[in-house]
Image: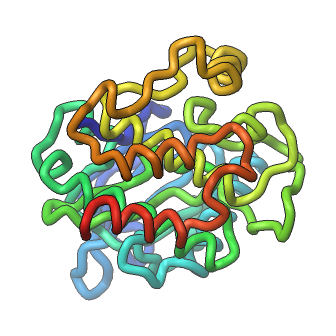
Amino acid sequence: MPLFGSSGTGETELRQPGQFGPYFLQELINRGGMASIWLATDAQGKAVAIRLLHHHLRFNLAAKRRFLRGCEILSKIHNHEYVIGYMAHGKIDGDRFLAMEYVEGENLKLLFARTDRVLTENIGNILIDTAIALEHVHESGFMHLDLKPENVLLTRNASVRLVDFDLARPKPDKPKKMSDNPGTPAYMAPEQIRRQPIDHRVDIFAYGVSAYELLTSRKPFPGDSPDEILRKQLDRSLDFVAPRELNPDIPAALEKAILKCLERDPDRRYPYMSVLVRDLQAALYV
């Protein structure tokens, strides 16, 4: 069975291991387009993860605003076992940083790419725990808006951590048109790609795409552009394949839940993650 992961190439990392305010940067773990992640230790010698906005973006107002928003939202919702832990954020020597819980593990995208046994042997619990994490985000008053395998970490003992809240927004009482269109097209709901008003149900759609991909090793609506993805979302006769046709081991009740997440009309999707969590637990006998 499949999964999701994290990767990225950014600027050449100029920073070297060493002291960074009260932290000591030990090792560069990952580097993306906007920030790098370091394994560090705090003043007490405890391991922490430090996310650093790239130095060349320090004067980029949009990047700073996005980075800061992710920090502030995480600080409000992190008190949950399936959301990455928040420690502090701020600016040291002109560089924006976020100090987080350090966990030994990788994102689902990377684990999926190599068919890792930790993923395949615990897929039921991973699906449920990721849904519970998203339920917590929604109940805390936010939409994630970039749910995908790359933004779910899995520890060595198969514990989930939802990460990366840079694109998150407050959850509106009714669908609201966004001034921008954040997200990753392959995981976006039709109304999101069309730049129509959205609410938390776009996250439920993204969850369905991720679960489908994880269980079948392919995306439900593959495409090289947002327009192509949207066409396939709206016309399921093009090449949509039900999950159980690709993987007969998927329980029928789980397939039904995934298909409900993937409804093109948000009113036909699950209204709340709590209802989806209940159905997942029933389908997977957990």
Residue 173 in the image: above or below residue 192: below
Outermost residue, front side: 252
Residue 25 higher or lower than 145, as above or below? below
- Is 284 in front, or is 4? 284
Q: Picture coordinates of residue 146 (x, y %)?
A: 58, 48
* Residue at image point 76% right, 57% down: 199
**In this rendering, would 165 be left or right of 217?**
right
Left or right for 217, reference 117:
right
- The colour style of the image is rainbow
Name the quarter where the C terminus is drawn. bottom left
Residue at 50% in and 45% down: 208
* Quadrant of the frame with the N terminus: top left
Is any part of residue 223 visible from this angle? yes
- Nearer the observer, 222 or 51: 222
What is the x, y in percent for residue 182? 71, 43
Residue 233 left/right relative to 179? left
Where residue 9 sits: x, y (%)? 43, 31
Q: Position of residue 246 (x, y in %)?
A: 31, 25
> In percent of the image, x 28 and y 60: which residue is there?
284
**What residue is rendered at 20% in x and 49% in y?**
119
Q: Residue most toward the bottom?
A: 44
Where 152 falls versus 60 (above or below)? below
Evaluate whether residue 59 shows in this view.
no
Count the numbered circles shown.
0
Left or right, 39 with respect to 219, comes to left
Q: Nearer the viewer, residue 112 or 249?
A: 249
